Image (spheres, helix red, strand yellow):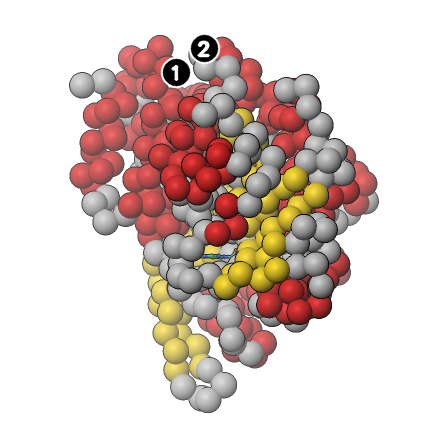
Amino acid sequence: MGYVDEVFETVKAKNPNEPEFIQAVTEVLESLRPVVDANEELYRKNGILERLTNPDRQIRFRVAWVDDKGNVQVNNGYRVQFNNAIGPYKGGLRFHPSVNFSILKFLGFEQVFKNSLTSLPIGGGKGGSDFDPKGKSDREVMAFCQAFMTELCKYIGADQDVPAGDIGVGGREIGYLYGQYKRIKGLYEGVLTGKGLSYGGSLARTQATGYGLVYITDELVRDHGDTLNGKVVAVSGAGNVAIYATEKAQQLGAKVVTVSDSTGWVYDPEGIDVELLKEVKEVHRARLTEYAEKRPSAEYHEKKDANDHGNWYVKVDIALPCATQNELNLEDAKALVANGVKYVCEGANMPTTLDATKYLQDNGVLFICGKASNAGGVATSALEMSQNSERLSWSFEEVDSKLQGIMKNIYKNISAAAEKYGHKDNFVMGANIAGFEKVAEAMIAQGIN
Ligand code: NDP
């Protein structure tokens, strides 16, 4: 049995109840085969794959807080510090009832390669809680965040581990978390990113993931002799990534006709009204029904159940899944291909199932996986860390132009890596190989630990 297969069997045996983690490891290890086969002795001698698939540490803690009725509530808190070979652990915090070690390990594992692709000095980690901020008052969210940080602060620091936002953790939550860190540690340091502008945040961080996704999509489209101008686009999600992907795509002349949330989706043939979407989601924190009520051209479709992905059945040129993991399955991929989709670039982390990815690639769809196409968010977080370290803040234009440069560079590197190993235009393989090579080199240089 080859090295890749041996390690894969061990990962499956040791993590039997972690399907998302196994899914992420499968995708990465499969695509690393050419580079691992070419250097098997070196990687085996250094235990590179075994070490890469085992987090440095997994932390789990109790978070007890008091709700508005005076009752004690208890949630699980987590931090997975996956790999710090090339820089301090860096990765978001997710607050969602589905959060568990399988999901956080898949996210942390992906983060290692993504962060490497940015070419910035950041390692990989992820954390969060099964706490659901939906329907909670501001005071309850603050109470939870303070209790969460009271424990988390023991394990993080500006040069150690720098968390950020993710699903359910936006500007409000980062503010409460930062306030509590500062209060306990007495340190005003860049320990969290995604901060507000008045206390060390970076301009363009809010937009970065969505804008970065569209910048790399633009590179992909141009590299294939095409243009974004006039393209019809399906976006899923209606959160941070989806909103700013929609905004940038429309600024570059494309028309986004769908967005979705966990209960339904909107088809707006005139193109999504981004300002209205921001008002509904960022200001009112409301459902998409409110968007449809205020926008005569929009049709609202209630989801029949969690597996209803009707939003992928609309005829589009480009699909940008920006909601959550496994939201685009094989049936959805077939519908997109039947409707003539040409490009799929992931804004969310692992939104496309493995069989759907394969189907898209086998049918000539140009596909970029999230660890490359959504890396603009963490890259801009790393730029926020740089600004905090030098006690300066850069202009929007400066950050945005660095982001554009980073996304162009990622496209160039993943494209070159795929071509080098004889798989031109296989950007999944290109992203995994390009991300892996740097981390493996740093791990070997630093000895066995
Ligand atoms: P938000 O919480 O801002 O938005 C998430 C959106 O997806 C919401 O519209 C939400 O609907 C929907 N959604 C969440 N869970 C589900 C589900 N189980 N089923 C259907 N819809 C769901 O998160 P972000 O936009 O920040 O993140 C979206 C994705 O992008 C995630 O995979 C995240 O890991 C990834 N990502 C985010 C980055 C960032 O900078 N924010 C960076 C890189 C990746 P509802 O409003 O109903 O909850």
Pointer 2 residue: 422
Q: Quadrant of residue 436?
A: top left
Near-viewer residue (442 or 117): 117
* Ligand 1 within 8 Å of the CB at mark 2: no
Q: Quadrant of residue 120?
A: top right
For residue 381, the mark is none
For residue 35, the mark is 1
Tell me the quarter of the image containing the C terminus: top left
For residue 119, above or below residue 136: above
At horizontal 27% and vertical 23% (from top left) the residue drawn is: 4
Percent position of residue 345, x then y: 55, 36
For residue 332, above or below residue 416: below
Gap between marks 2 and 1, in whole Å? 11 Å
Tell me the quarter of the image containing the N terminus: top left
Specify few, some or many for label 1: CA neighbours under 10 Å numbering under 14, 14-19, or 20 or more. Answer: some
Whether residue 110 is visible to the viewer of this picture, yes or no, is no
* Secondary structure category for the residue under label 1: helix
User: Is residue 3 shown left or right of residue 304?
Assistant: left
At horizontal 39% and vertical 29% (from top left) the residue drawn is: 358
User: What amino acid is labelled 1 in the image?
Assistant: Val
* Secondary structure category for the residue under label 2: loop
Near-viewer residue (170 or 289): 289
Near-viewer residue (195 or 273): 273
Percent position of residue 159, x then y: 55, 44
